[in-house]
Image (tube, rainbow, N blue to C red):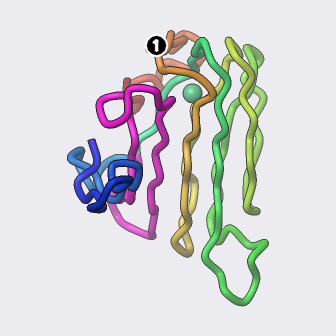
Amino acid sequence: MAKYVHSGKYGKYFFSGSDRVEDGEHGVTLAVVDQQAVKSSYGCLISWLYPRETPYGTHPAHIHENAEYLIQVGTNVDNPFDLGSEIELCMGKEMGKHTITRPTVVYVPPGFIHSPWTIKKVNQPFIFMQIPHGAPRGSVYYPQLLPENERDIMKY
Ligand SMILES: [Zn+2]
């Protein structure tokens, strides 16, 4: 649920902040829309991640019924194509590793195994957006695809 909502007739469609933890495992939640806030929404989460000592959380390999976009945007005003950070995303049941160092939109097809989405380095803040293409109905996790020593750090 959004923490700050605009006033006026259509203020209910503007979201900023969150009732969820604002500085947690996925950084600072800038804005979130979920079906509690707007029943017809598929949801959207925007986070701000920055250099910090506490490691960021991640999820094990999983699938969900609907496709989603995973969007990473840098904040380097001198070079908009520099993410200023390094993220590793595993794709497919083969757990193919992809390193993201530029602003990137990842399209995850429906029912496709993806993650962990792991932040390896944050040299400069970046923005992360998770945008599903359908109503969230939960995820199915595949921790068995990870080496045993990596399963303990995963969040569900
Ligand atoms: Zn996912």
Placement of the N terminus among the 4 image quadrants: top left
Relative to residue 5, is residue 130 depicted above or below?
above
Residue 35 on the magenta span? yes
- Residues 11 and 128: in front is 11
Q: Could you say where residue 13 lies in the image, as x and y percent from the top left? A: 41, 49
Q: Could you say where residue 33 lies in the image, as x and y percent from the top left? A: 40, 42
Mark 1: amino acid:
Arg
Q: Is residue 60 left or right of residue 67?
A: left
Residue shown at 38%/67% (left/top)?
52
Question: In this view of the protein, can residue 111 be seen by the observer?
Answer: yes
- Total labels: the figure holds 1
* SS of the residue under disc 1: loop
Relative to residue 74, is residue 68 depicted above or below?
above
- Residues 41 and 51: in front is 41
Residue shown at 24%/44% (left/top)?
20
Residue occupied by mark 1: 137
| Residue neighbourhood size for the residue with mark 1, other residues' Cα within 10 Å, grouped as few (<14), some (14–19), many (≥20) | few
Residue shown at 74%/77% (left/top)?
80
Residue furthest to the bottom in view is 78
Question: In this view of the protein, can residue 27 be seen by the observer?
Answer: no
Q: Quadrant of residue 109?
A: top right
Q: Is residue 98 left or right of residue 12?
A: right
Quarter, ligand 1: top right
Relative to residue 95, is residue 33 depicted above or below?
below
Placement of the C terminus among the 4 image quadrants: top left
- Residues 150 and 40: in front is 40
Q: Is residue 118 left or right of residue 57?
A: right
Residue shown at 28%/57% (left/top)?
5
Residue 46 on the magenta span? yes
Residue range highlighted in magenta: 27-56
- Residues 95 and 31: in front is 31
Relative to residue 121, is residue 108 depicted above or below?
above
